[in-house]
Image (cartoon, rainbow, N blue to C red):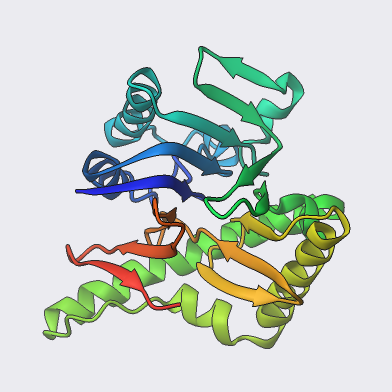
């Protein structure tokens, strides 16, 4: 079991068939923290509108989070574009330890100020051409379907290493790479303008810790493919943890 000062997770997409909710329940069971940040797209309102079936494992995630709040964990829920249905009601304070907002400030062990946001406000497509974003969501779903087919074949021929077609497209197709670079640059520029020393976000499903233009940029990743969490230890060290499907629990080198 791990114990951390803070845990950050994003892009769980509860309400979709691709959400790795069972793995997330396992992760939340085996890891404790003083603070738990849910960095957007936790509940997929777009999928719910399409009447996607809500599974018991998705309810288990919600119950696990609420139980942590009752037992003393400070829970901060940052809204994203997929759970934007909550935004008309913000800010929300539910009980003593569950807060919901568009953004939060996080002060690290070393007293550095981090801007915590899902990131969709810094995505020009999501903000100005929502129909394109929705179409892209369908396309991403199609790639995830193909992932499933490819990995059935992978296991059948005895290849153990997980491989993701959707991740390959995201990391190698020029337009996708350019979009990610633009997103990161705009977000870092905003954090610098506001006087923050770092930014913590989600949205693009790409877990990462690196420095950009003097700003610490950290992305939580997702619980659809990579099953990653960003954590800060009690000693002030930042790590990315991958809770991968094969049962191996790795720290991603940064």
The x and y percentages for residue 177 are 66, 81
Q: 137 or 109: which is nearer to us?
A: 109
Q: Is residue 52 left or right of residue 128?
A: left
The residue located at (84%, 59%) in the rendering is 190
Q: 237 or 75: which is nearer to us?
A: 237
Furthest-top residue in this view: 95
The x and y percentages for residue 16 are 44, 44
Q: Is residue 155 above or below residue 144?
A: below
The residue located at (62%, 27%) in the rendering is 100
Q: 226 or 173: which is nearer to us?
A: 226
Count of labels shown?
0
Q: Quadrant of residue 192?
A: bottom right
Q: Is residue 252 above or below residue 80?
A: below
Q: Is residue 30 left or right of residue 52?
A: left
Q: Quadrant of residue 210?
A: bottom right
The x and y percentages for residue 71 are 32, 21
The residue located at (82%, 51%) in the rendering is 127
Q: Is residue 158 above or below residue 211?
A: below
The residue located at (72%, 19%) in the rendering is 89
């Amino acid at each position: 079991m791990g114990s951390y000062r803070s845990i950050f997770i994003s892009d769980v997409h509860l309400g979709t068939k691709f959400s790795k909710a069972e793995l997330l329940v396992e992760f939340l069971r085996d890891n404790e923290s003083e603070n738990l940040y849910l960095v957007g797209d936790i509940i997929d309102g777009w999928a719910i509108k399409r009447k996607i079936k809500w599974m018991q494992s998705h309810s288990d995630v919600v119950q696990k989070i609420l139980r942590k709040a009752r037992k003393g964990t400070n829970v901060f829920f940052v809204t994203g574009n997929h759970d934007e249905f909550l935004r008309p009601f913000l800010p929300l304070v539910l009980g003593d330890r569950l807060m919901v907002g568009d953004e939060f400030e996080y002060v690290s062990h070393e007293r550095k100020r981090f801007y915590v946001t899902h990131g969709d406000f810094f995505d020009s497509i999501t903000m100005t051409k929502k129909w394109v974003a929705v179409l892209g969501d369908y396309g991403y779903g199609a790639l995830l379907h193909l992932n499933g087919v490819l990995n059935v074949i992978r296991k059948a021929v005895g290849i153990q290493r997980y491989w993701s077609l959707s991740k390959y497209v995201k990391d190698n197709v020029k337009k996708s790479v350019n979009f990610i670079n633009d997103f990161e640059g705009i977000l870092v520029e905003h954090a610098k303008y506001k006087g923050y020393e770092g930014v913590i976000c989600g949205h693009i499903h790409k877990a990462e810790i690196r420095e950009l233009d003097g700003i610490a940029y950290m992305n939580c990743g997702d619980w659809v493919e990579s099953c990653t969490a960003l954590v800060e230890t009690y000693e002030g060290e930042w790590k990315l943890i991958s809770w991968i499907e094969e049962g191996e629990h790795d720290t991603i080198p940064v």
